Image: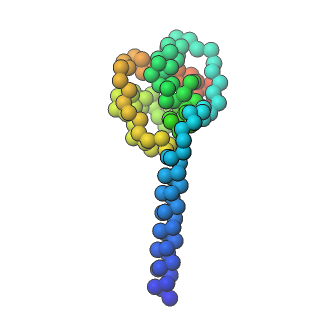
Amino acid sequence: MSRNRGLNVTVIAALLIAGYFLTFRGDRERPASGAAMVQVSVPPLDGAASEGERVFNDYCASCHGPDAAGREGIAPPLIHRIYEPSHHADGSFLLAVRQGVRAHHWPFGNMPPVEGLTDRQVEQIVAYIRMLQRANGIR
């Protein structure tokens, strides 16, 4: 009887593992629609945030979407609780630009480094993202 129980546990575990991988693979193979993933309210921008919007649009929006709303099947929204300052500090954005990011929160794959941005421009992008986050209830 214990041999059958062990076999049953093995079969169940194999089915669960196979189901996980088939589900994950299915997520990655969905066609990229590019649709916005979240709705973003944009407040009046000034200073570094205003300049950050321009730089973001030049370097980041093609993947992360206008107003950092994400693009379905392409890249995540940055106006999301995952990216709140207590979880992803401002410096994490600089590291992401410089070194890229290994996929860990979303099924979009790895983010490559972004060439051509200065530290000041990344600071402006962060000011823009943080302003959008605050305007959308992310503190």
Q: In this view, does 51 lie to the left or right of 99?
A: right
Percent x, y for residue 138? 59, 31
Residue 95 visible in the current orientation: no
Residue at the (48%, 57%) spot, across then down: 21
Left or right: 96 as drawn, with respect to 76:
left
Report the residue that reaches farthest toward the bottom.
1
Colouring of the image: rainbow
Q: From the top left corner, tell me how far across and down residue 62 is, in percent.
A: 49, 26
Q: Residue at x 45, y 31 (%)?
A: 89
Residue in front for this viewpoint, 5 or 27: 27
Q: Which residue is drawn at 63% across and 27% down?
A: 40
Name which quarter of the figure residue 122 lies in: top left
Q: From what the image shows, is residue 135 above or below residue 86? A: above
Relative height, residue 54 to residue 78 (above, below): above
- Can the viewer see residue 55 in this picture? yes
Count of all numbered marks drawn on residues in the image: 0
- Quadrant containing the C terminus is top right
Farthest residue in the top direction?
Answer: 47
| Residue at the image position 52 percent from the left and 17 percent from the top | 53
Residue 7 lies, with reference to residue 58, above or below; the image says below
Q: In which quarter of the image is residue 77?
A: top right
The residue nearer to you, when weighing 70 against 73, is 73
Q: In this view, does 94 lie to the left or right of 48?
A: left
- The percent coordinates of residue 10 (x first, y second) are 46, 74
x and y percentages locating residue 14 in the rendered image: 47, 68
